[in-house]
Image (cartoon, rainbow, N blue to C red):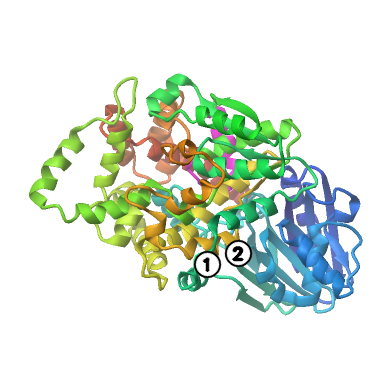
Amino acid sequence: MCGIAGTYHWPDGGPLTDRLTKTLAHRGPDGSGRYTHAAGTGEVHFGHRRLSIIDLSETGAQPMAAGGLAITYNGELYNAPELRRELESAGVRFRGTSDTEVLLEAWRRWGTDCLPRLRGMFAFGVFDERTGELTLVRDQLGIKPLFLVRRGGGLVFSSELKALAAELGGSLRVDDGALVASLLYYWVPDGRCAYREAEKLPPGSWLRIRPDGQVTRGVYWSIRDVAAEAADAPAPDLAEVVADSTRAHLLADVPVATFLSGGLDSSYLTALAARSRPGISAYTIGFRAEDAKFEAMPDDLRYARQVAARFGVDLHEIEIAPRVRELLPAMTYHLDEPIGDPAAINTYLICTAAREAGVKVMLSGMGADELFAGYRKHVANLLALRYQRVPGALRRPIETVVDRLPVASANRGYRSVRFAKRFLSFAGMPEETAFRRSYTMYDRAELLDLVHPDLASTVDDVLAEHADTYHDNALADHVNRMCLTDARMFLPGLNLAYTDRSSMAASTEVRVPFVDVEVVKAAFALSGREKIAGRQGKAALKKAALSILPKEIVYRPKGLFSAPLRAWMSRDLAPLVREVVEDGLVVRDGLLRRDALRRLVAEDAAGQQDRAKHLWHVLTLEHWYRGATASEQREIS
């Protein structure tokens, strides 16, 4: 895993590429490289920071150039050995054993036709010295990021938005629509970018720019189309598909470890990995007892220990009692955009501990909940359909009682009350609206009340985007419509984004075997009834996991890879919340309304509503906004 950057026909492109690459040093501390081509109508520069995983020798160094092609590549190809054998049979001779060289030769032989054949996670740029064309590519599911800015006939790209923002300064203005979207979701959807003019290359697509400045785009893989085709296909052996993906994701010339929360997904992958690599290490987290009690968090550690003991895993336990006030601005910087999920801190601390122990690669169970309907919201939306059939005369007393119940006392949180309040906030809504409300932060009225009146039309645009994405499919299955929307929005916009940024901040590669093209096909070949059985989510995956895991792990209560937010907000971060509400830049600049923020604080303090996540995101937004506007001011001055 690496950091890539480059410029194409851009003023002072060489020095700019060097500065971009320097900013990405944390993504690749093992080496750096540069490529320059200066001929014809303009210069092309590639920069690279290397995290050596496969072929640790210099034959794997980047940028790599051979036979008129040059590449700077961030990623891993898990089917590189198969592609290598095919290319060798066609007469290709390789210098080393890196997947970079395999990708370069696959591109030489097949061009963009090689892309649907790639199994892995990647973002890369390829320059053809003969035609003068630069092509940028991103993997099928958006696991790896690629940001770019086009101006005139030129282009600049980078693995991280912060590098572009730091170097292009005030020419990149904050995009109000992206900030409104981040308030709704607590992350920025992959189709938007926090800065105007900057953009994210969409998953499963490529972009090509020619010397005359002409740009063409192509889509080589679409999860919407894959889901539609899979719905008519016979269901495969899911246990074998997951086992095959896990084996493929273990490909490395360095030690590999796993995240092990004790939940189904991480336990399943850890058990499979241990079967291939006996004695593999795993990392798990715990929280201060008082924090876990206040958050009403389940005891995941005992399950993680049970899995480790059963499969001979070397378990490393990390208690998270972070100095959150110090970590908050650092994590906001690393996350590139305003992302309000504290799980990013967990990932960063786990990866930091693993890196200090010499581990460069971690396996994560990320993606299983989205693809196999494992979140509570999936089951809750099906229950909402039943609830709507209950006569209003019976619903109203229930809703009145639940509304009056507190979500926490002075020393303890009430998890079931939080869930009940959340459920009733969307249970009576139409399908798409209910699904959106089941996992977003605000309804339309609350969001309008929070932001500046001039942003009202932007609120409606953001809500319309969700509706358009939700309905943009031909699936007849309610559960799979939810899973597809998650795979297109929630997964790349939040979970894959924070996993990449927070792990790479610790110079660690995280691989996600469930977020794999073959696993995706298998997931959408399953019906909603196979994914949710009664009130049991992820039923098909649990059935598959029984091939290796004991029932007490497979059917344990669902855990949370999160953090004790209520404890942090009411204790560690309470002064900072007050500071932001009364004198934060997002308030002074008119983006957020002070009176609305005061109501959120009061509701949370009274224990009647759980606003911890809302307030955490306000803090992340404030810190991100300070950095973004400071860049603008530096450019203006």
Q: Position of residue 531 (x, y in %)?
A: 41, 55
Tell me whether circle 2 and circle 1 mark residues in contact (CB < 8 Å): yes
Amino acid at circle 1: Ile
Q: How many marks?
A: 2
- On whether residue 327 falls in the magenta region, the answer is yes
Say left or right for 174 vs 513: left
Residue range of the region highlighted in magenta in the rendering:
324-342
Determine the image quadrant of residue 574. top left
From the image, tell me which residue sits under label 2.
140
Q: Secondary structure at mark 1?
A: helix
Q: Is residue 245 left or right of residue 605?
A: right
Residue 429: x, y in percent? 24, 57
Residue 398 can be seen, yes or no: yes
* Residue on which the image places disc 1: 223
Counting residues from the start of the chain, the first of labels 2 and 1 encountered is 2
Q: Position of residue 587 (x, y in %)?
A: 40, 41
Amino acid type at circle 2 is Gln
Q: CA distance from mark 2 to mark 1?
A: 8 Å
Provide the secondary structure element on which disc 2 rests: loop
Identify the mark at residue 208; answer none if there is no mark.
none
